Image (cartoon, grey):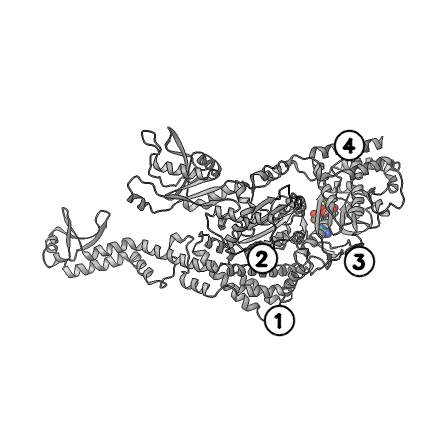
């Protein structure tokens, strides 16, 4: 791809005798120390790759593979990437799952030359680039965190924490550091929430037979040797990193958490070659503090990206009005991990309320935030010595923006606690830091410090002089030439320059004599006589020459010194700067959520510890915006899943506090069922992340776990039948949902034959009602299920209304109490453009089937027994041995403990039972 490269002076890799050259020796030694990385070996303005690395990289990057010398009699394959484009290539390689060791020249090639013409420049690896330890903006997504996650499992022998996992995750680009423990069953959900850029674990865990296939399905997993996860040294490694006496300051950490946290920092130190990015002390996330949402539910609800993987069309995209990248990251974090503590939620809602109420303040704060760059990431880069002048400017502008905002917000008597906390944090950085930076930095800044020119003129006298010499060398020389011409009276005297003599005075042969005799011969020293000219030098010119030659180097050296000093003051203030950066993000998110609330008419939800779930005139936040773009209205709908009938006040949570209602939603295809289900789940998510919600009123009793499943979603990639996936996921819900959970089931049972599907849907609803007792929404095309409401008191039949008009169907998207009278499938098919002959024929077939249906066994459904394991005995026990056996068989299954094969066999057995019944 990049062919415009300067050719490197060929240096034979092996001499005639086939011996290895010193350079190759050095390369091989460094490569051997980093066997699992592609080695970027610095040579002049290129990073070169050799041998197999070159073959891998040339294929991955589409760059030319060349060769360079021989090694043990064979050509050495080589390819290279130019320094100035190396980020771009690194990005590609990292995205493809490679790790890269960057090996730099750590001395001036001139120094090496002094040791002898053939000596090799000293080189060493200065950094390992891995997916979870990136800091460059060009390698990172500004609006997303990039976590390194360390995973450790309790040894099976310790029975107290058997099989539990310790988790620690770090975003080294922002300094966030968190730890938690989780049950084996919750691991996948935690990883789905964090979406780590890289996971580290022990070799043993990586090859655990039960988890191996899961780990291999994750994008970047790095197995490491045991010492990284050594529990005995964990405490010491942590206290060492943070220079504290004990880890007690971080709260009481379990052994698992300590081990994971230590593994994380050890890996960070290894990849950063000992540099220590400014990490916050590890913050512990207590189990249950956030709403548990598993992977399937996350993707199904399209929280941060759509099912096709795009941000556009997700809930995050619909509500994101943040101004800064840090705000966007915090918003995504909050959305991925809604809270379960009503007071913490209220604290966030208070901030939004303030910004909703005071639109002047809101727009002013948002305006100010525009001048606030990505402080956290600039800071990280500066501390690990990967920063540049623009990062220093970001610190300057960020701290200034923070103090301006603090002043603007100060003195509000009504400010909620989170805002007063933020104000204090905004004031933490010492104003001397941005002042120092402002005085030193030029207006226009280069991308890299090595380019120079970033220190303001007038800041440093020595630098100014060096630059004046460099930039004004011509003028200085010209001045000297005029003076010499004047003093000698030789009008045509010239000062010239060439590579052999450097600067010299030149006169024609006829004037040569004059300069070689007194008084001029005191100043002018003869250097060369040519055919027509004579050349001289002077002491003055020699001095000037040396100065000019060194001026550029000197200017750059002074600038780099200045950079290092400024970076030092920033590093010393790192923790205060980080606190201000976090406060800016909190302000951004609060003002942004207020902004979307005002724009889209969201209101403050009431969130408490009851089991209530009342949404009045709720809307789907994403569908609503999509329709609005086409000028279409969204039909708002109510939903009430509270335990008691709406006429009574909802009971308090706790023992005997009652259980939630289940909406059984029927209606034609395209009626709005799926939209209704999701909008209620999304309103719960929004409320608990501390956002206003698209509803006229919402009262949400804290949800602890959220589940959402759609029938018959294809998962061909993992080689499982769609129906199998549906059943595995339904099983997970029936096993895990509790009274405080919210369950959304959309067309479960669609993926198999009618009677199978109906039976499973039937039994599932009974289980939800009697065993899980959770709040739930269930959409189905099995009208037969509506009969269940006669027996299950908390099952509520609702339907998406349609209107028939001149033989066509009109979708009203209104969800009302009741049962769909018919499925309108043929009308929908007509709308879709099926040929009229097919529509007519279908109508005839339908009429015939409906006539026969009167004798159908389905009609006996309302006499069927209720769920066998129900805590309350069924009101009217009736007998249908086959169905009872089916239900018993179903409830005896423990899908979590089954292998896919066992599950499939169980399904066949279930199906056989139904066939028995039919015959
Ligand atoms: P179903 O699940 O019943 O087949 P969907 O929920 O998928 O129906 O809705 C079908 C389409 O109807 C959606 O794509 C959306 O454009 C529209 N729609 C759904 N609900 C509403 C509503 N409440 N107001 C306006 N349009 C809606
Ligand atoms: Mg649907």
Residue 17 picture location, percent across and down: 32, 29
Calculate the distance from the C-alpha at mark 1 to the C-alpha at mark 3: 36 Å
The residue indicated by pointer 3 is 651
**In what element is the residue under mark 2?**
loop
**In what element is the residue under mark 3?**
loop
**Which of these two is toward me, 420 or 810?**
420
The residue indicated by pointer 4 is 909
Front tag of 1 and 3: 3
Q: How many labels does the image show?
A: 4
User: Can residue 807 be seen here?
Assistant: no
Figure check: 813 above or below 888: below
Mark 4 in CB contact with mark 2 (< 8 angstroms): no
**In what element is the residue under mark 4?**
helix
Calculate the distance from the C-alpha at mark 4 to the C-alpha at mark 2: 54 Å
The residue indicated by pointer 1 is 413
Res 540 → quadrant: bottom left
Q: Earlier in the sequence, mark 2 or mark 3?
A: 2
Q: Which of marks 4 and 3 is nearer the N terminus?
A: 3
The residue indicated by pointer 2 is 322
Front tag of 1 and 2: 1
Calculate the distance from the C-alpha at mark 2 to the C-alpha at mark 3: 38 Å
**In what element is the residue under mark 1?**
loop
Q: How crowded is mark 1: few (under 14 residues within 10 Å), some or many (20 or more)?
A: few
Quadrant holding the C terminus: top right
Numbered badge on residue 431: none
């Amino acid at each position: 791809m990049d062919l415009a490269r300067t050719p490197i002076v060929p240096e034979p890799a092996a001499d005639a005798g086939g011996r290895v050259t010193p350079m190759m020796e050095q390369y091989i030694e460094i490569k051997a120390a980093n066997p699992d990385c592609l080695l970027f070996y610095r040579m002049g303005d290129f990073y070169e790759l050799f041998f197999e690395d070159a073959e891998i990289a040339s294929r991955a990057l589409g760059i030319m593979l060349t060769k360079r010398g021989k090694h043990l009699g064979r050509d050495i394959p080589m390819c290279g990437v130019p320094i100035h484009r190396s980020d771009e290539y690194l990005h590609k390689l990292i995205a493809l799952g490679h790790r890269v060791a960057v090996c730099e020249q750590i001395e001036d090639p001139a120094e090496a030359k002094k040791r002898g013409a053939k000596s090799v420049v000293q080189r060493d690896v200065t950094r390992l680039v891995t997916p979870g330890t990136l800091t460059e903006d060009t390698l990172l997504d500004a609006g997303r965190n990039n976590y390194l996650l360390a995973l450790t499992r309790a040894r099976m022998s310790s029975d107290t924490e058997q099989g539990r996992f310790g988790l620690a995750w770090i975003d080294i680009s922002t300094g966030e550091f968190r730890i938690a423990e989780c049950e084996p069953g919750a691991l996948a959900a935690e990883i789905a929430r964090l979406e780590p850029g890289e996971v580290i674990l022990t070799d043993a865990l990586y090859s655990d037979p039960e988890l191996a296939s899961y780990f291999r399905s994750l994008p970047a997993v790095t197995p490491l040797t045991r010492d990284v996860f050594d529990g005995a040294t964990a405490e010491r490694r942590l206290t060492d990193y943070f220079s504290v006496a004990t880890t007690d300051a971080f709260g009481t950490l379990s052994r698992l958490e300590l081990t994971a946290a230590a593994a994380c920092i050890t890996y960070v130190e290894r990849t950063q070659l000992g540099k220590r990015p400014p990490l916050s002390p590890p913050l512990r996330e207590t189990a249950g503090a956030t709403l548990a949402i598993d992977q399937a539910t996350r993707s199904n609800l399209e929280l941060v990206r759509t099912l096709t993987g795009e941000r556009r069309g997700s809930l995050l995209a619909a509500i994101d009005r943040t101004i800064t990248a840090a705000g966007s990251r915090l918003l995504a974090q909050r959305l991925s991990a809604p809270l379960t503590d009503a007071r913490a939620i209220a604290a966030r809602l208070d901030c939004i309320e303030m910004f909703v109420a005071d639109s002047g303040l809101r727009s002013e704060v948002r305006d100010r935030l525009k001048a606030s760059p990505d402080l956290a990431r600039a800071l990280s880069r500066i501390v690990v010595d990967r920063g540049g002048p623009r990062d220093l400017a970001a610190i300057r502008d960020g701290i200034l923006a923070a103090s301006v905002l603090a002043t603007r917000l100060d003195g509000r008597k009504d400010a909620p606690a989170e805002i007063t906390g933020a104000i204090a944090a905004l004031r933490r950085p010492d104003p001397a830091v941005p002042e120092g930076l402002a005085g030193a930095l030029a207006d226009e800044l280069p991308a890299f410090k090595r380019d120079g020119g970033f220190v303001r003129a007038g800041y440093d006298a020595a630098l100014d002089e060096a630059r004046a010499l460099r930039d004004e060398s011509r003028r200085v020389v010209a001045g000297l030439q005029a003076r010499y011409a004047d003093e000698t009276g030789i009008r045509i005297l010239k000062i010239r320059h060439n590579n052999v003599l450097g600067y010299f005075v030149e006169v024609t042969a006829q004037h040569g004599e004059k300069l070689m005799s007194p008084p001029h011969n005191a100043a002018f020293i003869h250097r060369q006589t040519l055919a027509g000219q004579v050349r001289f030098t002077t002491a003055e010119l020699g001095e000037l020459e040396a100065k000019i030659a060194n001026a550029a180097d000197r200017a750059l050296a002074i600038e780099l010194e200045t950079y290092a000093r400024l970076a030092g003051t920033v590093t010393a203030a790192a923790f205060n700067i980080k606190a201000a950066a976090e406060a800016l993000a909190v302000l951004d998110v609060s003002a942004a959520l207020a902004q979307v609330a005002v724009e889209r008419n969201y209101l403050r939800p009431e969130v408490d510890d009851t089991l209530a779930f009342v949404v009045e005139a709720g809307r789907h936040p994403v569908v609503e915006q999509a329709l609005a773009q086409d000028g279409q209205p969204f039909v708002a709908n109510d939903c009430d899943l509270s335990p008691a009938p709406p006429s009574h006040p909802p009971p308090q949570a706790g023992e005997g506090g009652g259980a939630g209602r289940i909406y059984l939603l029927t209606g034609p295809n395209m009626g709005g069922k799926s939209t209704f289900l999701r909008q209620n789940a999304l309103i719960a998510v929004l409320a608990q992340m501390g956002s206003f919600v698209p509803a006229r009123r919402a009262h949400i009793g804290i949800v602890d776990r959220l589940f959402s499943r759609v029938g018959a979603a294809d998962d061909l990639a993992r080689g499982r039948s769609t129906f199998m996936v549906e059943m595995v996921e339904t099983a997970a819900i029936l096993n895990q949902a509790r009274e405080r959970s919210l369950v959304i089931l959309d067309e479960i049972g669609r993926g198999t034959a009618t009677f199978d599907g109906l039976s499973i849907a039937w039994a599932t609803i009974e289980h939800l009602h009697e065993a899980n007792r959770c709040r739930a929404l269930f959409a189905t095309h099995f009208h037969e299920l509506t009969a269940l409401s006669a027996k299950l008191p908390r099952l509520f039949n609702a339907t998406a209304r349609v209107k028939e008009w001149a033989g066509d169907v009109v979708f009203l998207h209104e969800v009302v109490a009741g049962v769909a009278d018919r499925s309108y499938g043929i009308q929908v098919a007509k709308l879709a453009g099926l040929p009229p002959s097919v529509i007519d024929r279908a109508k005839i077939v339908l009429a015939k089937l409906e006539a026969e249906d009167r004798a159908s066994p389905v009609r006996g459904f309302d006499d069927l027994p209720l769920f066998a394991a129900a805590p309350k005995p069924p009101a009217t026990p009736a007998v249908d041995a086959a169905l009872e056996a089916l239900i018993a068989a179903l409830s005896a299954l423990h899908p979590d403990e089954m292998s896919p094969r066992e599950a499939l066999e169980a399904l066949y057995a279930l199906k056989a039972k139904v066939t028995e019944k039919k015959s």
